[in-house]
Image: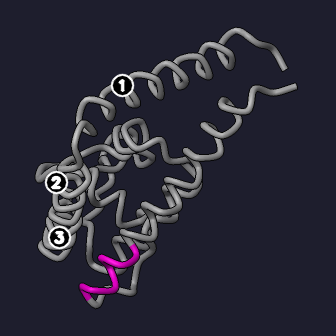
Amino acid sequence: MIDAAYAELTRLCERLHRRYLDIVRLTLSEAGDDAITPVQALMLAEMGDGEVELRDLLDRGYHLSSTATYNIRKLSECGYLEQTRSQRDRRMSRLKLTERGRVLRDRLNASDAMNARQFLERPGLRERVGEAVAVLRELERSYFEHMSYRRF
């Protein structure tokens, strides 16, 4: 039988992610930006001001390459990203935010900062968040080890 606390933790992580996407959706709606999805917006939020290789963005954001490729194409078509292919290897591409992409990224980051401030103002919560992050990192490491050493 599965431990109830473990089961709740794993389900809660998924629900928290969906709730976070709801917050991103609200931010997009407030900006009048309905051309992209919250997942696509999060890809923008993970980018800096310089160029980044698609592979690096995938590694950083834990996106699947098949959906990331579609999302990158959509973000480029909507004017949020500039995508350039390597002259040496056409499979490699570099990405850079456009002005429109930077504005939306900054708006998402500001929304995150405001939510973090409000959340962490609660008494005693700041310390507990650090503990929660440590537990989630340990769970992530455990999953990674399970996948690395187990044959299917």
136 to the left or right of 99: right
Amino acid type, mark 1 = Glu
Quadrant for the C terminus in the image: top right
Residue tagged 3: 107
Residue at (34% x, 50% y) in the render? 93
Q: Tell me the SS state at disc 3.
A: helix
- Residue 135: % across, % down: 46, 23
**What range of the chain is rendered magenta?**
25-31
Q: Are marks 3 and 2 in contact (CB under 8 Å)?
A: no
Q: Are marks 1 and 3 in contact (CB under 8 Å)?
A: no
Task: Estimate how packed mark 2 is, as few (under 14), some (14 to 19) or many (20 or more) residues with alpha carbons within 10 Å.
Answer: few
Q: Tell me the SS state at disc 2.
A: helix
Residue tagged 2: 117
Query: Viewer-proximal residue, 64 or 45?
Result: 45
Between discs 1 and 3, the one toward the N terminus: 3
Between discs 1 and 2, the one toward the N terminus: 2
Q: Tell me the SS state at disc 1.
A: helix
Q: Is residue 68 above or below residue 81?
A: above
> How far apart, in angstroms, are the residues tagged by discs 1 and 2?
18 Å
Magenta stretch secondary structure, dominant? helix
Which image quadrant for residue 45?
Answer: bottom left
Q: In front: mark 1 or mark 3?
A: 1
Residue tagged 1: 131
Amino acid type, mark 2 = Arg
Which image quadrant for residue 77?
Answer: bottom left
Query: Viewer-proximal residue, 65 or 40?
Result: 40
> How far apart, in angstroms, are the residues tagged by discs 1 and 3?
29 Å
Residue at (71% x, 36% y) in the render? 7
Task: Estimate how packed mark 1 is, as few (under 14), some (14 to 19) or many (20 or more) residues with alpha carbons within 10 Å.
Answer: few
Which image quadrant for residue 32?
Answer: bottom left
